């Protein structure tokens, strides 16, 4: 009986502490990484109550706002990871543990298994549109460059556990393998990062992707930055600012995007996911006559690690980064604002550039340019 009373008192104290924390937040909780849509129950209607929609919204609100939520979530995730080598499957961006502590997001494994390959005629249409854009921009004295970025799984397939590899995908070609020959036949200017990385890996270059990140490493972004400058010099026929490596610095602490998946794992001990990393210390090789182009870059989150050293070494005179073609990041200054696609002044903001670079990651070939290619063609056809 005494034990039962102690249990009841302890349970009620626990509930009281949670309620106090939920409504008054006297204690700072652990922060969770990742974006989520906030639940707002609102005023219930009879229909919402009858269908259960209102009850579901209340339940979701409670899950998001309960006291010490961060501590509970991280504790639960840590137990799953420590005991079962698994991450929470409830996270909107599913995280998978690969060999040698390599972390993957599920969409990249799905792409590796060729689960969303497009029909060749669809890829032909995309390749043709990119070719047309390059030709029409050339007529306006604007260069065009397609930057193809890889996934970790295609560069390090040995890090993908066998249990995640589907036999059905082993003999198929992925979208990248099908569209690249189409683009090359059409003479599209390309920096093929997947091909470059595989060759670098073959020759002994390491750390192209961080174990704790989904995107290529800062070092990998730097390496492709140097290759992109080389390709741009060919297109312009002019010497540009180049980036030189003074030395490589080893670290056990990843920087920025090099730990993006590790953060999303929301563990109590995130550092247990870190391995080793290298970061180049760079300097610009900039003779007095070096050409600094005015650049528009359209692409995904893979561009951040590409921009990092480009901006640090003042390679471009101006850079606008159309992030997913919905936010305009302006360099220098790193100001940003939403893009109103219907209000873009194409003659002023796009067609006055020295070069337009469109980045496409291999898992997003079906969304090539996020609508920019089509909108640019429409603007040029007017």
Image (spheres, rainbow, N blue to C red):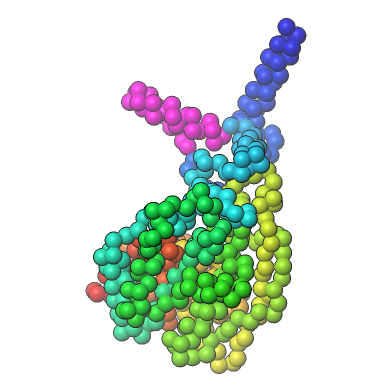
Residue 160 in view in this figure: yes
The furthest residue to the left: 382
Direction from residue 217 to residue 168 in the image, left or right:
left
What x and y, as percent, mark residue 111? 43, 57
- In this rendering, the count of numbered labels is 0
What x and y, as percent, mark residue 165? 47, 53
The furthest residue to the bottom: 289
Query: Which range is magenta?
Result: 39-65
Q: Looking at the rendering, in which quadrant would you find the C terminus?
A: bottom left
The furthest residue to the right: 2
Is residue 145 highlighted in magenta?
no
265 lies above or below 45: below
- Identity of the residue drawn at 32% across and 79% down: 185
The quarter of the displayed image where residue 158 is located: bottom right
- Identity of the residue drawn at 67% across and 19% down: 11
Is residue 43 highlighted in magenta?
yes
- Identity of the residue drawn at 46% across and 36% down: 40
What x and y, as percent, mark residue 113? 43, 55
Direction from residue 12 to residue 382 in the image, left or right:
left
What x and y, as percent, mark residue 126? 31, 68
């Amino acid at each position: 009986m005494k034990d039962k009373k102690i249990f009841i008192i302890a349970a009620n104290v626990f509930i009281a502490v949670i309620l106090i924390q939920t409504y008054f937040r006297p204690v700072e909780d652990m922060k969770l990484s990742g974006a989520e849509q906030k639940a707002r129950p609102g005023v219930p209607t009879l229909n919402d109550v009858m269908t259960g929609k209102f009850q579901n919204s209340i339940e979701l609100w409670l899950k998001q706002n309960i006291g010490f939520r961060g501590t509970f979530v991280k504790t639960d995730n840590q137990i799953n990871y420590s005991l079962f080598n698994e991450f929470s499957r409830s996270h909107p961006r599913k995280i998978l543990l690969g060999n040698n502590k390599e972390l993957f997001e599920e969409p990249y494994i799905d792409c590796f298994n060729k689960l969303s390959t497009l029909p060749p005629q669809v890829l032909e249409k995309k390749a043709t549109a990119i070719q047309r854009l390059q030709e029409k921009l050339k007529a306006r004295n604007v260069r065009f460059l397609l930057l193809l970025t890889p996934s970790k799984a295609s560069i390090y397939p040995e890090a993908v556990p066998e249990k995640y590899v589907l036999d059905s995908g082993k003999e198929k070609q992925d979208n990248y393998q099908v569209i690249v020959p189409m683009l090359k036949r059409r003479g599209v200017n390309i920096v093929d990062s997947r091909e470059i990385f595989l060759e670098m890996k073959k020759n002994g270059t390491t750390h192209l992707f961080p174990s704790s990140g989904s995107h290529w490493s800062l070092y990998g972004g730097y390496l492709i930055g140097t290759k992109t400058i080389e390709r741009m010099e060919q297109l312009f026929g002019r010497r540009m600012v180049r980036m030189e490596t003074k030395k490589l610095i080893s670290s056990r602490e990843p920087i920025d995007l090099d730990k993006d998946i590790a953060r999303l794992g929301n563990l109590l001990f995130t550092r247990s996911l870190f391995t080793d990393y290298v970061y180049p210390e760079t300097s610009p090789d900039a003779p007095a006559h070096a050409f600094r182009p005015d650049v528009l870059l359209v692409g995904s989150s893979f561009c951040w690690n590409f921009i990092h050293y480009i901006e640090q070494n003042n390679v471009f005179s101006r850079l606008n980064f159309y992030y997913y073609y919905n936010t305009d990041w302006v360099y220098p200054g790193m100001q940003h604002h939403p893009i109103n696609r219907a209000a873009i002044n194409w003659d002023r903001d796009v067609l006055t550039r020295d070069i337009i670079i469109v980045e496409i990651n291999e898992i997003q070939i079906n969304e090539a340019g996020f609508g920019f290619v089509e909108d640019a063609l429409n603007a040029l056809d007017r």
